[in-house]
Each structure stands twice: as structure tokens, then as C-alpha cells.
Image (spheres, rainbow, N blue to C red):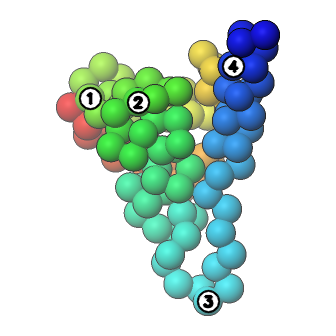
Amino acid sequence: MKTKLLALMMGTSLVLAACGGASDNKGGGNDTASGGDAEKIFSQKCSTCHGGNLEGGMGPKLADVGSRLTKDQIKNKIEHGGGGMPEGLLKGAELDKVADWLSKKK
């Protein structure tokens, strides 16, 4: 019973994390992930699983990901997912910004 409950909670968390970061930006400012910097994008769309300080949680720790993976490898992981991470959470300019930012985390 506990295993089923844990699996349900983890599945729900993944779905909610994948949908996170939506914001209505009718004012045209730079306060949403799509218009903001890499750290803001990460905070709004990735920190649910990877932690607000890149410390990890449901997803792996990313505080030193740049010492393990290149920018292209990070970008590929975000694009294609795997290991519990859904694919395509970031695209286009957001993907490039976050992959570049994370690649500098040594």
C-alpha cells in the first residue's frame, strides 16, 4: 500500500513539475520564464525536481553539472529526457539559456 501511494505521489509530482512555470504575461514585461534569464527559467520550470539551489530532490543535483556534462549534453538531456525526466520541458531560446547557464555550474 505504501509503495502504491509513493508511486502515485511521485507520478503526480512529475506531472505537476512538467506543467509548472506557466504565467500570464499580458503586461509584456520580463517577469515570466519565457522572457527572463536562465536562472528565472530554471526556477519556474525545473526547481521543483532539481531544487531551488540546484541541490537535487526528486531529480539529481545540478550544482556541479557543468563539471560532468557539456552544454550540448545538458541540452540533449533537457530535449530528450530520460531517467524520470520528461522530454521537451524547455525549447528554443529557453533551452539554450538554461543549458548554457547549467554548463557553467562547476
Q: Which one is in front in this view, the residue at disc 1 or the one at disc 4?
A: 4
Check contact, mark 2 vs mark 1: CB within 8 A: no
Q: Tell me how far mark 4 sits from mark 2, CA to CA.
A: 18 Å
Tag shown at residue 6:
4
Q: Is residue 76 above or below residue 90?
A: above
- The reply to whether residue 70 is in sight is no
Camera-nearest label, 4 or 3: 4
The amino acid type, in three-letter code, at marker 2 is Gly
Q: Is residue 64 above or below residue 105?
A: above
Of labels 4 and 2, earlier in sequence is 4
Residue indicated by mark 1: 64
Q: CA distance from mark 4 to mark 3?
A: 40 Å
* Label 1: element kind: loop
The Cα–Cα distance between marks 1 and 4, rounded to whole angstroms, is 29 Å
Question: Which badge, 1 or 4, is on the more N-terminal residue?
Answer: 4
In the rendered structure, which amino acid carries the disc numbered 1? Asp
Alpha-carbon distance for marks 3 and 1?
36 Å
| Callout 4: SS | helix
Question: Residue 106 location in percent, x, y?
Answer: 21, 31
The residue singled out by tag 3 in the image is: 27
